[in-house]
């Protein structure tokens, strides 16, 4: 569950080796699941459930201030919140991130450092329950037997973290 204690870049800047999958995806240990995710920015996957997952992370870290901002649309607020997140991670935690407002390989990989194991199995065909641990709240997620990620949105509904559609609002 998303909880809180009530808080365009150039393509090269957001580059990375994208798996090309339709969903945020992983296998084996969850620690490197987000190393090959797609780009999220105002011109790429800008209206998607993957963006909604990213916004939930920004909210958990206090960079978005209202659950209503978790709508799956990568607009100006999400762009600015992403830049603020990247700046904090770089200046306070030693990340080597370009502060460009885009979520590419480096930003996704760095965010993956805050995903922790809750329960389940890393074996193929099993469900793995995970949590993004933010500064002000957490985002509950699960990796399904097919490797695709789901997360609980601000309304308490499970949403698949897809790149090519938006069902969160």
Image (cartoon, grey):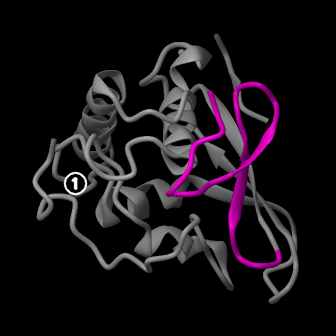
Q: Position of residue 77 (x, y in %)?
A: 34, 22
Q: Is residue 107 left or right of residue 164?
A: left
User: Residue, x 70% and y 26% (percent of image)?
Assistant: 154
Residue that sits furthest to the bottom in the current view: 124
Quadrant hosting residue 138: top right
Q: Position of residue 166 (x, y in %)?
A: 58, 43
Q: Position of residue 34 (x, y in %)?
A: 50, 68
User: Residue, x 64% and y 34% (percent of image)?
Assistant: 168
Q: Which residues are magenta?
A: 145-169
Quarter containing the N terminus: top right
Q: Is residue 160 magenta?
A: yes
Instruction: Label 1, secondary structure: give it.
Output: loop
User: Residue, x 67% and y 16% (percent of image)?
Assistant: 5
Q: Nearer the viewer, residue 114 or 102?
A: 102
Q: Which residue is mark 1?
A: 97
Q: Dot 1 surroundings within 10 Å: few (below 14), some, or many (20 or more)?
A: many
Q: Is residue 23 left or right of residue 155?
A: left
Q: Is residue 65 above or below residue 100?
A: above
Q: Position of residue 136 (x, y in %)?
A: 59, 25
Main SS, magenta residues: loop
Q: Is residue 94 left or right of residue 48?
A: left
Q: Is residue 19 magenta?
A: no
């Amino acid at each position: 569950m998303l909880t809180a204690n009530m808080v365009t870049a150039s393509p090269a800047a957001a580059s990375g080796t994208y798996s090309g999958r339709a969903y945020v995806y992983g296998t084996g240990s969850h620690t490197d699941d987000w190393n090959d995710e797609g780009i999220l920015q105002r011109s790429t996957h800008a209206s998607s459930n993957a963006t909604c997952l990213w916004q939930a992370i920004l909210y958990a870290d206090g960079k978005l201030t209202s659950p209503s901002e978790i709508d799956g649309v990568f607009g100006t607020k999400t762009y600015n919140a992403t830049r603020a997140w990247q700046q904090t991670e770089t200046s306070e935690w030693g990340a080597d991130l370009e502060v460009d407002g885009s979520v590419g390989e480096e930003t996704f990989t760095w965010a993956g450092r805050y995903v922790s194991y809750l329960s389940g199995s890393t074996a193929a065909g099993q469900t793995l329950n995970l949590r993004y641990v933010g500064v002000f709240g957490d985002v509950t997620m699960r990796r399904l037997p097919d490797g695709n990620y789901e997360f609980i949105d601000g309304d308490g509904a499970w949403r698949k973290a897809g790149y090519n559609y938006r069902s969160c609002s």
